[in-house]
Image (tube, grey):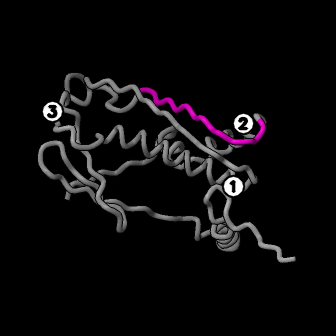
Amino acid sequence: MTHTATTHLNDVDIAAVASLAAAIVDDGDRAATTWNATVRWNGGFRSHAAIREFAPIASDEPAGLGGTDSAPNPVEQLLGALGNCLAVGYAANATAAGIELQDVFIELSGDLDLHAFLGLRDGHAGFGAIRAEVRIDSDATADQLAELHAKVTSTSPVGHTLAHEIPLAITLT
């Protein structure tokens, strides 16, 4: 009888994740990473972000905000980034816990007052609130899903970035 070890769950390479975790345990300096993106303006409110070797990610504003509505705007992309980060967290943590996922669906919305953005008054130009509703299709118990949810929301890099004040340096050269 031949025994084949499971190497993937939820389409996650278990060995690769375990290897990275072990390398970080052995050498904590490996956990410190830097990520990069470059953005080029394309005229009007259109721009694109280049990240690693991927196709550029377009950005524009809706017509009602003076754009041509050719792509999601930056705040929509921020919501998408949070949702994508949460999805990664659910996949990674479910896999680590041995939970099989059939589907994860995350619906996000955020409230933004345009007064400050348009220079009509001083104040906070960013989101005043962000909401995410997560639906998971899995055979896991309600307790397992609650534990998974708590783990994901407490370890999401994008979630933490949005929820905590961080140093931001924007320089003109």
User: In the rendered image, which residue does mark 1 sit on?
Assistant: 95
Q: Name the amino acid, label 2.
A: Ala
Secondary structure, mark 3, is loop
Q: Quadrant of the N terminus?
A: bottom right
Look at the numbered discs 1 and 2 and tell me whether their residues touch, using CB distance below 8 Å.
Answer: no
> If you read the primary sequence from the N terminus, does the residue marked by circle 1 or circle 3 appear first?
3
Measuring from the top left, give residue 101's x and y in whole percent.
66, 47
Secondary structure, mark 1, is helix
Measuring from the top left, give residue 110's x and y in whole percent.
42, 29
Look at the image and say whether residue 135 sits in the magenta stretch.
yes
Residue at 29% from the left image edge and 40% from the top image edge: 73
Q: Residues within 10 Å of mark 1 (few under 14, many from 20)?
A: many
> If you read the primary sequence from the N terminus, does the residue marked by circle 3 or circle 2 appear first?
3
Q: Name the amino acid, label 1.
A: Thr
Secondary structure, mark 2, is helix
Residue 169 vertical placement versus 23 (above, below): above
Q: Report whether 15 appears left or right of 34.
A: right
Q: Main secondary structure of the magenta part?
A: strand
Quadrant housing residue 67: top left
Quadrant housing residue 151: top right
Look at the image and say whether residue 78 sits in the magenta stretch.
no
Measuring from the top left, give residue 82's x and y in whole percent.
48, 43
What numbered label is drawn on residue 172?
none
Frontmost of labels 1 and 2 is 1
Residue 120 vertical placement versus 92 (above, below): above
Task: Give the residues drawn in magenta, as a range.
Answer: 128-141
Q: Report whether 15 appears left or right of 116.
A: right
Quadrant housing residue 8: bottom right
Residue at 47% from the left image edge and 33% from the top image edge: 108
Residue at 20% from the left image edge and 23% from the top image edge: 120
User: In the rendered image, which residue does mark 3 sit on?
Assistant: 66
User: In the rendered image, which residue does mark 2 sit on?
Assistant: 146
